[in-house]
Image (tube, rainbow, N blue to C red):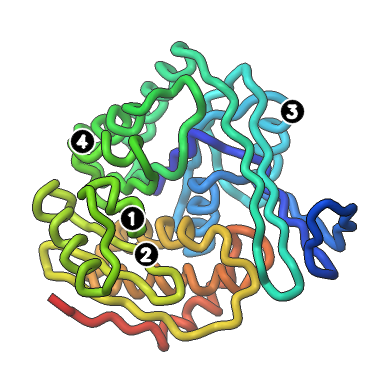
């Protein structure tokens, strides 16, 4: 079983426009798709699509929290949340006909110290039963900048792998807890090392430095359409995905995390883990619905996904 932790859940609304977005005007939405959102819930749907048992946890609250649970039920995602007093937020992704995406992300509503304590207990309980636990995205006000460090430590003390996909102080403060894998972009590597890698050679060197100096088993740097770089004990690898016509890129990084958790739970070789996760992420880009993809499409894309050792 794989567990995902989403501290900042949301109702994600994808607005598809029939004409380009015009600021300062009234825009009519052609179609609207509602999803149970937050990075970890996108990862949870990826896990389910890959055919593995999933349990999603995090904070939910209010009417939006009830809707979020109903949407997860419709997706067939088992959940075990900490129910907070504050209302779950909403996030909007505006999609234009040419594929351009504009996002409006509400901040997470505050959680109390008692609710944070309940989350620690929840993660400890779930970690005892899970094969892999992922921590995804931002945290609501009141959770504190050390919340992921504390939660990752709980999972690692239980002897289970922990994947961390966050940014800023939440990422930097958590590295001492030794998450099994982190998935930074170049800005997040800058927050860790104090410098931003620009060229592919610099990215390779930076990923290896984070892996070796901070004791992180896998450092996976996402490069968008240019693929990924992964540093691990087996070496540094460059993954490249086939070129596609992107429909909606939102949630692709989260899909990659969920697919990585599946690959790790199945004991794949590290090169296969990267190729498998990248093919699922690419398939997500071909779906208008955030965090959803067709496994058959991912399997087709896998044949065109390459992974080579570069260091």
Q: Which mark is residue 60?
A: none
Q: Nearer the viewer, residue 169 or 9?
A: 169
Closer to the eye: label 4 or 3:
4
Q: What x and y, as percent, mark residue 205? A: 16, 66
Label 2 and label 3: CA atoms lie apart by 35 Å
Q: Of label 4 and label 2, which has the lower sequence position?
A: 4
Quadrant housing residue 263? bottom left
| Residue position for label 2 | 222
- Asked if disc 1 and disc 3 are in contact, CB closer than 8 Å, the reply is no
Which residue position holds label 4?
177
Mark sitting on residue 183:
1
Secondary structure found at label 2: strand
Separation of residues labelled 1 and 3 (CA atoms): 32 Å
Horizontal and vertical percent for residue 177? 20, 36
Residue 274 placed where, x, y %? Answer: 31, 70
The answer for how far apart the CA atoms under marks 4 and 2 are is 22 Å
Vertical relation: 308 (above or below) 54: below
Give the class, few, some or many, for how many residues have Cα within 10 Å of label 4's Cα (few <14, many ≥20). many
Cβ atoms under marks 1 and 4 closer than 8 Å: no
213 with respect to 101 (left or right): left
The local secondary structure at tag 1 comes to loop
In the rendered image, which residue does mark 3 sit on? 63
Q: Callout 1: 10 Å neighbours few (<14), some, many (20+)?
A: many
Q: CA distance from mark 1 to mark 2?
A: 7 Å
Identify the residue at horizontal 52%, vertical 25% (top origin).
82
């Amino acid at each position: 079983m794989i567990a995902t932790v989403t501290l900042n859940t949301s109702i994600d609304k994808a607005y598809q426009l029939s004409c380009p977005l015009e600021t300062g005007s009234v825009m009519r939405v052609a179609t609207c798709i509602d999803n149970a959102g937050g990075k970890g819930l996108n990862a949870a749907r990826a896990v389910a699509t890959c055919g593995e048992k999933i349990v999603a946890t995090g904070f939910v609250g209010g009417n939006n929290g009830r809707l979020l649970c109903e949407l997860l039920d419709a997706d067939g995602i088992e959940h075990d949340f900490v129910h907070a007093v504050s209302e779950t937020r909403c996030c909007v992704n505006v999609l234009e006909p040419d594929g351009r995406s504009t996002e409006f992300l509400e901040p997470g509503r505050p959680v109390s110290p008692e609710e944070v304590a309940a989350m620690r207990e929840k993660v400890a309980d779930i970690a005892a039963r899970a094969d892999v636990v992922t921590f995804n995205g931002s945290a609501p006000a009141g959770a504190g900048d050390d919340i992921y460090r504390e939660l990752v430590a709980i999972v690692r003390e239980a002897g289970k792998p922990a994947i961390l996909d966050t940014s800023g102080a939440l990422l930097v403060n958590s590295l001492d807890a030794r998450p099994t894998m982190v998935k930074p972009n170049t800005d997040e590597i800058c927050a860790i090392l104090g410098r931003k890698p620009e060229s592919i050679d610099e990215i390779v060197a930076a990923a290896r430095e984070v892996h070796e100096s901070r004791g992180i088993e896998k450092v996976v740097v996402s490069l968008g359409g240019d693929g990924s770089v992964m540093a691990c004990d087996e070496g540094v690898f460059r993954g490249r995905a086939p070129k596609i016509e992107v429909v909606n890129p939102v949630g692709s990084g989260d899909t990659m995390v969920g697919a990585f958790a599946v690959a790790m739970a199945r004991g794949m070789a590290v090169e296969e883990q990267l190729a498998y996760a990248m093919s699922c992420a690419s398939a997500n880009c071909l779906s208008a619905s955030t965090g959803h993809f067709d496994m058959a499409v991912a399997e087709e894309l896998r044949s065109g996904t390459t992974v080579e050792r570069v260091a």
